[in-house]
Image (cartoon, coloured by chain):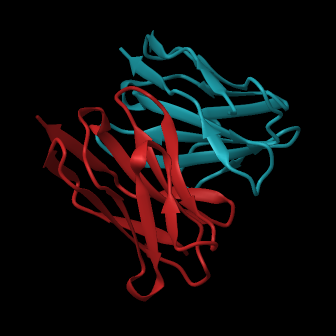
């Protein structure tokens, strides 16, 4: 099956710093990747959709300048949380699909804690 | 817009008992529906999906779901719960190429 790997699985950072989360498709080329945020005991909220080589499409209410998404290659997308604050602490999950109409495979998630 | 509603944020069953997790959808077009499972501090794993073929869909780990258009439902069932089934379960609908998730149901299995 298709494997999507996220790194790191856990990260703690100081308030005001930036942190980068990587999402890699290990055995397939992903033209589309999705980034989700999950608050404790809640559902996944789609933050943005990224297509390789183009700008990400952000969902309403998501600050694109705060959550920078880069999808520079067919196997790697990154989410950078800039100037992180404690309220950004959350579980971030990515998913990747070969193209927009095919099944998306999920990474194992990254737990971000901002102190 | 398409959406899903999961009834019951928590479901508790005894080991060996029937598992029934409820999901109702809202869609103006024939939907693609999914069930995912999430174990603590992990991503999501696809259990099964409905893509307008057979209305009864069999998935992994003994789970299955039946698409009922008349009831706008896509409930997830398993005849006999196992301790390892304890997890969070999410129903989702494909809304113009992005997944919209329900609020999730936490399944507890007691010995």
**Which residue is located at x 53 percent, y 34 percent?**
A93
Residue A32's x, y, as percent? Answer: 76, 44
- Chain with cyan colouring: A
**Which residue is located at x 54 percent, y 22 percent?**
A83
Residue A40's x, y, as percent? Answer: 31, 36
Q: Is residue A87 left or right of residue A34?
A: left
Q: Is residue A97 left or right of residue A115?
A: right
Q: Is residue B66 left or right of residue B87?
A: right
Q: Quadrant of the N terminus of chain A?
A: top right
- Chain with red colouring: B
Q: Quadrant of the C terminus of chain A?
A: top left
Q: Is residue A26 left or right of residue A67?
A: right
Q: Is residue A33 above or below residue B2?
A: above
Residue A70's x, y, as percent? Answer: 76, 31
Q: Is residue A115 visible?
A: yes
Q: Nearer the viewer, residue B68 or B104?
A: B68
**Which residue is located at x 43 percent, y 22 percent?**
A111
Give the quadrant of residue A94.
top right
Q: Is residue B45 above or below residue B22?
A: above
Give the quadrant of residue A12.
top left
Give the quadrant of residue B54.
bottom right
Q: Is residue A84 above or below residue A38?
A: above
Q: Is residue A43 visible?
A: no
**Which residue is located at x 19 percent, y 51 percent?**
B10
Q: Nearer the viewer, residue A85 or B79?
A: B79
Residue A54's x, y, as percent? Answer: 86, 43
């Amino acid at each position: 099956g298709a494997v999507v790997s996220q790194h790191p699985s856990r990260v703690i950072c100081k308030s005001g710093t930036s942190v980068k989360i990587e999402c890699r498709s290990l055995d397939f080329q992903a033209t589309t990747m999705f980034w989700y945020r999950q608050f404790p005991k809640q559902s996944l909220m789609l933050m943005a959709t990224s297509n390789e080589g183009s700008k990400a499409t952000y969902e309403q209410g998501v600050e694109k300048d705060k959550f920078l998404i880069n999808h520079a290659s067919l196997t790697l997308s990154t989410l950078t949380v800039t100037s992180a604050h404690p309220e950004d602490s959350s579980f971030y999950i990515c998913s990747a699909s070969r193209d927009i109409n095919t099944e998306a495979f999920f990474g194992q998630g990254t737990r971000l804690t901002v102190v | 817009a398409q959406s899903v509603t999961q009834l019951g944020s928590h479901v508790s069953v005894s080991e060996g008992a029937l598992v029934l997790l409820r999901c109702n959808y809202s869609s103006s077009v024939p939907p693609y529906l999914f069930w995912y499972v999430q174990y603590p501090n992990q991503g999501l794993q696809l259990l099964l999906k409905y893509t307008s073929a057979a209305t009864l869909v069999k998935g992994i780990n003994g789970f299955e779901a039946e698409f009922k258009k008349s009831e706008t439902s896509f409930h997830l069932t398993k005849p006999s719960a196992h301790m390892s089934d304890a997890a969070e379960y999410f129903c989702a609908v494909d809304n113009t190429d992005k997944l919209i998730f329900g609020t999730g149901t936490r399944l507890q299995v007691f010995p």
